[in-house]
Image (tube, rainbow, N blue to C red):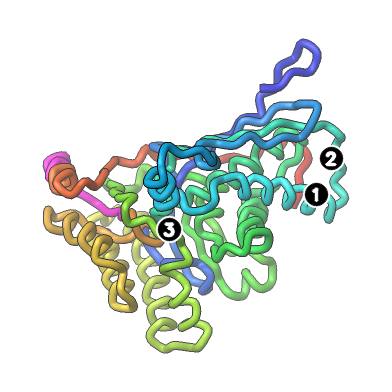
Amino acid sequence: MGTFGTVHYDYSHNRYPRAGLIGNPSDGYFGKTIAFSFRNFSAGITLYESPELEILPSRRDHSLFRSIEDLANDVKRHGYYGGFRLLKASIKRFHDYCHERNIQLDGRNFTLRYTSNIPNRVGLAGSSAIITACMRALMSFYHVTISRHTLANLVLSVEQQELAIPAGLQDRVAQAYQGLVYMDFNRKLMEERGYGAYENLDLELLPNLYIAYREDLSEGTEVYHNDLRSRWNRGDKEVIEAMQFWADLTVQFKDALLARKLERLPGLINANFDKRSSLYDVGAGNLDMVKTARSVGASAKFSGSGGAIVGTYEDEAMFARLQQAFANKGIAVIKPDYAPVFQVDRTNIAVQ
């Protein structure tokens, strides 16, 4: 919260994790996918005007520990980097983006801090949620509006160009648009205009969904994606055919949703994971989560790169069985609280 005279300005923004519901495990292969954002967790940015520009550390950026075991556990949980570098890279990239387009930013400075309770490194897009929230806060502070598809590309450029983090557009599109998003990363569109065809679908169409996760399996996205990428680059026939398989599943899933043929969805979700696990070792812990969910009749697939799964359940009795089965293994399970579709504020300066 900042002040100017007697007027108070609030530049706080929240963004939410996303779950990949169906489609390619990553979106750098000109495929198709459907994902949704949910509000059970959030990454928040507080930004207010101040004499100097300052980034305040969060609990993930601290350097004081109770013991050597505490330090080791912190690294295991959060990795070697907190959100500090994400914020510095976001601010720098926002500045460069505006400079490249001759958008004049005024001379005000600000203080910025972030918070996040999104489970870390379990494939729920916590890092891109922090970056997207930061971009939204900067847009509000400087009165700049950026279209949703451009914002997704801008967030991706923070990770790819500034931080050299392997990433794709799916997470950033889901968090820029929110709601339930169908994404077609058609090669021609991507190469000609730099973004795909994105469509918000009605959240009311969704069946009963759950998300389960276990942070003791946390791995960065690159752990699961690097081998697929190298095989794709080599023209591996099995991987190329799998990408087409996942794209076709996505179209089938969308068609079934729109036709309200919900009975078809569990089989498509299961097929999505089964194809993935046939290509590489998904890890014993991840596989156990999927098998546990399926043992009570629910469908299951990764929600991202591993550590969390998403699937359908029939009714409350099945959800109760899910809870019990997961509780026995120390696995958390939730019903997603869907984030509504985000609408661009057209009162500011439109930037394409």
Q: Residue furthest top?
A: 6
Q: Position of residue 285 (x, y in %)?
A: 25, 61
Q: Within 10 angstroms of label 1, few (less than 14), some, or many (20 or more) residues?
A: some
Q: Amino acid at mark 2?
A: Leu
Chain-order first, disc 1 or disc 3: 3
Whether residue 202 is visible, yes or no, is: no
Of 97 and 62, nearer the camera is: 62
Mark 1 → mark 3, Cα distance in angstroms: 31 Å
Q: Amino acid at mark 3?
A: Ile
Q: Amino acid at mark 1?
A: Cys
Residue that carries the numbered disc 3 in the rendered image: 34
- Which quadrant of the view contains residue 263? bottom left
> Of the numbered discs in the image, which one, if any, rests on residue 105?
2
Chain-order first, disc 1 or disc 2: 1
Of 162 and 341, nearer the camera is: 162
Span colored in magenta: 309-321
Q: How many marks?
A: 3
Query: Magenta stretch: residue 315 in it?
Result: yes
> Of the numbered discs in the image, which one, if any, rests on residue 98?
1
Position of residue 238 in the picture relative to residue 54 (left or right): left
Residue at figure coordinates x 45%, y 70% from the top left: 225
Query: Magenta stretch: residue 156 in it?
Result: no
